[in-house]
Image (spheres, helix red, strand yellow):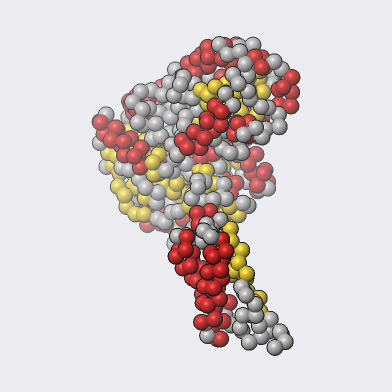
């Protein structure tokens, strides 16, 4: 039986990802027996999941509701909103909806995944309403740090909900609308039951600021520099790429773009009418042919990603460019919480080369793409929502967003967690159920549960090392030779003593087993594992991962 069959008369909101975290945005709206999804994003892995590239929301609930899912509306092209599409779409098999730039990025991902021919991708015209099942959707352009950011107005039989997506108000945007007050005010005049909105920058009291001001200040900053200048930023920040192009022109420098993701954004932007004003680009192979005071380099890696261009440059591993004393690297981006140590190491590596490092803390080189409280206040005044549901943020962001809504007179608020089923009505907001949610990991070319044993073993090995034990049994299930040990990443104290004691512990443990138990590989593996870990805890205070290789020589001549 369909989940929605018991809630036929209700309008529901259900976050599967993105509430209580920054990233993995995946939200469901349910009405009249159908679901529509807004965004399908990912987040990057951290040290807790070694070897994993991406973290995805677990869509198991949505998969069970597939027959009632009418489509996926994508608000804009950032990875935390579209990055899971190529990995999860086959679990949904429903149409996608996006405006041209976002569609270009998504189609590139689908082609890489080899499923582009299977997916129906509808190109949406902003400000023009269209039907998707029982919902009527209208994309409303909003400024953000990439091209074609949108909020989505969802009209239903129970009323209208406005899902803001990521947004800001910008009095001088390089790309995107200035302040779409008329469209938002018109939406508010029709009546909005709930605003479901971005909470990322809620601790900033003021408006987030204008890209035009960043451009003016970067031009002023770079004009005073007489050596090589590198600006690193988010590749997806199309407005910032336009700004960097303007800086190059204004300072008489040629421009080079470095990093695969930056090239991908450039191609998508030009294919959909953006980034047409950049100066002629210099291929990175010819950067060294241009005088240092005549080149500006834009590259990836503003968060310290180890494989990104600026990190490889800092390590002296980039084939096309090196930096020297007096050169400057400008980090035109926000330092995302959690990346401080990684970025600190990168800053230090550059400073060791006597390269000047400029961050948002040193100069006005960045503005956020998310609303400060002044922006939120203005949005509330235009849209006049009866209630507010904060999303897209950690718990502290959501709580502050809800509190601010109440401060300005919107008393009906609720702070959701992933899996909360929330009823939206003119009476307010009510949590009426919860459904299971979780996380998946993109591990190499496989998508696995976040608690997959291979990830757990890798984590254990990264923290405590790994020991492999090789055991050979003869035809009577006795040890035919001394065990062999391969030790990786485990502190050994006095190496010969450690090895001998470990060897003795394993040998004694196996020999204490009954003949019957020795015939079962699982039992032998468990006894070996316990003996190794117990000995390691005693000798060096570590609890390593253990693998046991068993060879049985039943035909051995006795």
> Which residue appears at 46% of the width and 68% of the height?
534
Which quadrant would residue 329 be assigned to in this image?
Answer: top right
408 is higher (above) or lower (below) than 471: above
Left/right of residue 151 with respect to residue 262 in the rendered view? left
Residue 429 appears in the picture as rendered: yes
> Which residue appears at 50% of the width and 47% of the height?
47
> Which residue appears at 48% of the width and 44% of the height?
24
176 is higher (above) or lower (below) than 29: above
Q: Position of residue 205 (x, y in %)?
A: 33, 25
Name the one closer to the observer, 40 or 162: 40
129 is higher (above) or lower (below) than 451: above
Which quadrant would residue 223 be assigned to in this image?
Answer: top right
> Which quarter of the image is occupied by the N terminus?
bottom left
Q: Where is residue 247 in the image (x, y as percent from the top left)?
A: 58, 15
> Which residue appears at 30% of the width and 47% of the height?
430
Left/right of residue 25 with respect to residue 90 in the rendered view? left
> Which quarter of the image is occupied by the C terminus?
bottom right
Residue 457 appears in the picture as rendered: no
Name the one closer to the observer, 394 or 3: 394
């Amino acid at each position: 039986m369909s989940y929605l069959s018991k809630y036929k008369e209700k309008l529901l909101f259900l976050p599967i990802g993105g509430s209580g975290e920054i990233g993995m945005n995946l939200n469901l709206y349910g009405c009249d027996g159908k679901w529509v999804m807004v965004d399908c994003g990912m987040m990057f892995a951290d040290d807790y999941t070694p070897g994993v590239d991406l973290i995805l929301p677990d869509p198991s609930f949505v998969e069970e509701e597939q027959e009632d899912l009418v489509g996926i509306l994508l608000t804009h092209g950032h990875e935390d909103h579209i990055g899971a599409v190529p990995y999860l779409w086959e679990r949904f098999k429903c149409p996608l909806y996006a405006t041209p730039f976002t569609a270009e990025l998504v189609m590139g991902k689908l082609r890489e995944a080899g499923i582009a021919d299977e997916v129906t991708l509808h190109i949406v015209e902003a400000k023009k309403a269209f039907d998707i099942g029982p919902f009527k959707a209208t994309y409303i352009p909003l400024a953000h740090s990439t091209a074609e950011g949108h909020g989505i107005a969802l009209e239903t039989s129970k009323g209208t909900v406005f899902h803001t997506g990521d947004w800001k108000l910008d009095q001088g945007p390089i790309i995107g609308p200035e302040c779409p007050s008329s469209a938002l005010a018109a939406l508010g005049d029709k009546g909005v039951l709930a605003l479901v909105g971005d909470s990322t920058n809620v601790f900033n009291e003021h408006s987030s600021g204008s890209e035009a001001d960043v451009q003016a200040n970067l031009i002023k900053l770079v004009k005073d520099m007489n050596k090589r200048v590198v600006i690193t930023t988010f590749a997806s920040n199309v407005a910032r790429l336009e700004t960097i192009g303007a800086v190059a022109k204004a300072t008489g420098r040629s421009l080079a773009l470095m990093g695969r993701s930056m090239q991908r954004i450039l191609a998508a932007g030009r294919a959909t009418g953006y980034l047409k004003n950049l100066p002629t680009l210099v291929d990175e192979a010819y950067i060294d042919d241009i005088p240092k005071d005549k080149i500006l380099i834009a590259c990836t890696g503003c968060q310290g990603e180890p494989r990104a261009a600026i990190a490889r440059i800092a390590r002296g591993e980039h084939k096309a460019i090196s930096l020297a004393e007096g050169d400057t690297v400008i980090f035109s981006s926000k330092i995302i919480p959690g990346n401080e140590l990684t970025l600190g190491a990168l800053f230090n590596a550059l400073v060791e080369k006597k390269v000047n490092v400029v961050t948002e803390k040193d100069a006005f080189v960045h503005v956020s793409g998310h609303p400060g409280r002044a922006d939120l206040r203005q949005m509330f005044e235009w849209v006049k929502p009866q209630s507010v549901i904060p999303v897209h943020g950690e718990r502290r962001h959501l709580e502050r967003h809800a509190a601010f809504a109440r401060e300005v007179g919107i008393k009906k608020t609720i702070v959701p967690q992933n899996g909360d089923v929330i009823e939206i009505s003119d009476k307010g907001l009510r949590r009426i159920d919860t459904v299971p949610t979780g996380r998946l990991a993109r591990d190499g070319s496989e998508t696995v549960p976040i608690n997959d044993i291979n990830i757990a073993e890798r984590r254990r090995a990264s923290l405590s090392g790994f020991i492999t034990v090789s055991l050979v049994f003869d035809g009577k299930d006795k040890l035919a030779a001394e065990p062999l040990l391969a030790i990786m990443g485990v502190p050994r104290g006095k190496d010969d003593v450690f090895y001998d004691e470990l060897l003795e512990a394993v040998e004694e443990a196996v020999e204490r087993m009954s003949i019957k138990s020795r015939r079962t590989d699982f039992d032998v593996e468990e006894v070996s594992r316990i003996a190794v870990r117990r000995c390691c805890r005693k000798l060096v205070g570590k609890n390593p991962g253990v693998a046991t290789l068993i060879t049985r020589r039943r035909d051995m001549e006795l």
